[in-house]
């Protein structure tokens, strides 16, 4: 199978086109377009997945099947039996066209190498078919044997589109419109890892230090969470440093009372000295003689 598909995609294809009753000849990633309702314009059907060319070993016919390989897992979302004289054309390297019962259809491939391999397998499908299928007249590329009839018409296979697109006679078909833009490259679904919480900032102080416990409790009582404290750590750290600096200044400088006592102390000392001098003068012989 093509390497563009993951191992899980390949298992999905094998599960929906089981081996006991089918032989898978080719697989590629593509989108399905139809020239409907405007036959001059390609319309994307919204269907994309792994398109499979399979040999139906029970019905001894060939089928195109589109398997959904997305996580939705809808199985076979479209199929088309390859009828007698089935014309499969390469409009572009990446875009192949063919006729459905009701309109023209096209497959837009995600990878050109897969597209080249796919169209080669379509044209050489008889070589790789089962022996029983090759012996069936309808499966022969020579067009021998009667073609099956569907809704009274011969040469047209069954399709899941059926009458949903409205009836259009193949004889009235016109040339298919120009090919649309190439399909976007297929990328398997990405398994996303679970989202992890962003790293939490550390608090601006050591919570195990009892000296900071009071500040933390004070902030929490004010309704500030630890996350908010961590987010504003720079501001809080600056506030703490400023607060510590103020406390240090207060401790080192004398209080107002101490400064006031210091100013009054020299006056009291002079008074005491004056009283002492007076007492000495009164008791001296000079003072007594003058009296």
Image (cartoon, rainbow, N blue to C red):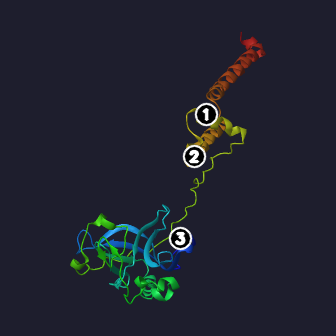
Question: Which residue carries the number 1 mark?
Answer: 218
Q: Residues within 10 Å of mark 3 (few under 14, many from 20)?
A: some
Rendered image: mark on residue 9: 3
The reply to whether residue 114 is in sight is yes
Left or right: residue 97 compared with residue 116: left
Left or right: residue 118 compared with residue 255: left
Question: Which residue carries the number 2 mark?
Answer: 238
Of callouts 1 and 2, the N-terminal one: 1
Q: Secondary structure at mark 3?
A: helix
Q: Is residue 167 above or below residue 181?
A: above
Q: Position of residue 154 (x, y in %)?
A: 31, 78
| Residue in front for this viewpoint, 230 or 280 | 230
Q: Secondary structure at mark 1?
A: helix
Q: Residue furthest top?
A: 291
Question: Spatial distance from mark 3 to mark 1, Cα to Cα?
Answer: 60 Å
Residue at point 50%, 75% (across, down): 58
Q: Is residue 129 above or below residue 46?
A: below
Q: Is residue 5 above or below residue 74?
A: below
């Amino acid at each position: 199978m093509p390497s563009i598909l993951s191992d899980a995609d390949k298992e999905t294809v094998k599960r929906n086109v089981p081996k006991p009753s089918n032989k898978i000849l080719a697989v590629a990633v593509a989108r399905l377009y139809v020239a409907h309702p405007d036959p001059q314009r390609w319309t994307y059907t919204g269907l994309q997945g792994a398109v499979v060319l399979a040999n139906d070993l029970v019905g001894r016919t060939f089928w195109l099947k589109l398997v959904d390989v997305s996580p939705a897992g809808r199985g076979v979302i479209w199929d088309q039996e390859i009828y007698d004289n089935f014309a499969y054309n390469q409009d572009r390297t990446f875009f192949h066209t063919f006729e459905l019962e009701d309109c023209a259809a096209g497959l837009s491939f995600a990878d050109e190498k897969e597209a080249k391999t796919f169209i080669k397998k379509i044209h050489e499908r008889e070589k790789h078919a089962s022996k029983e299928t090759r012996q069936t007249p309808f499966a022969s590329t020579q067009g021998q044997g009667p073609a099956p009839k569907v809704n009274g018409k011969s040469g047209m296979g069954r399709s899941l589109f059926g009458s949903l697109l409205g009836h259009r006679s193949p004889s009235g078909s016109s040339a298919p419109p120009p090919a649309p833009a190439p399909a976007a490259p297929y990328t398997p679904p990405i398994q996303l890892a679970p989202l992890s919480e962003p790293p939490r900032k550390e608090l601006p102080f050591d919570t195990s230090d009892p000296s900071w416990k009071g500040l933390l409790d004070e902030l929490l009582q004010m309704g500030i969470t630890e996350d908010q404290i961590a987010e504003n750590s720079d501001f809080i750290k600056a506030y703490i440093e400023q607060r510590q600096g103020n406390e240090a200044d207060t401790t080192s400088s004398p209080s107002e009372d101490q400064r006031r006592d210091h100013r009054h102390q020299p006056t009291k000392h002079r008074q005491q000295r004056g009283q002492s001098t007076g007492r000495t003068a009164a008791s001296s012989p000079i003072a007594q003689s003058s009296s």
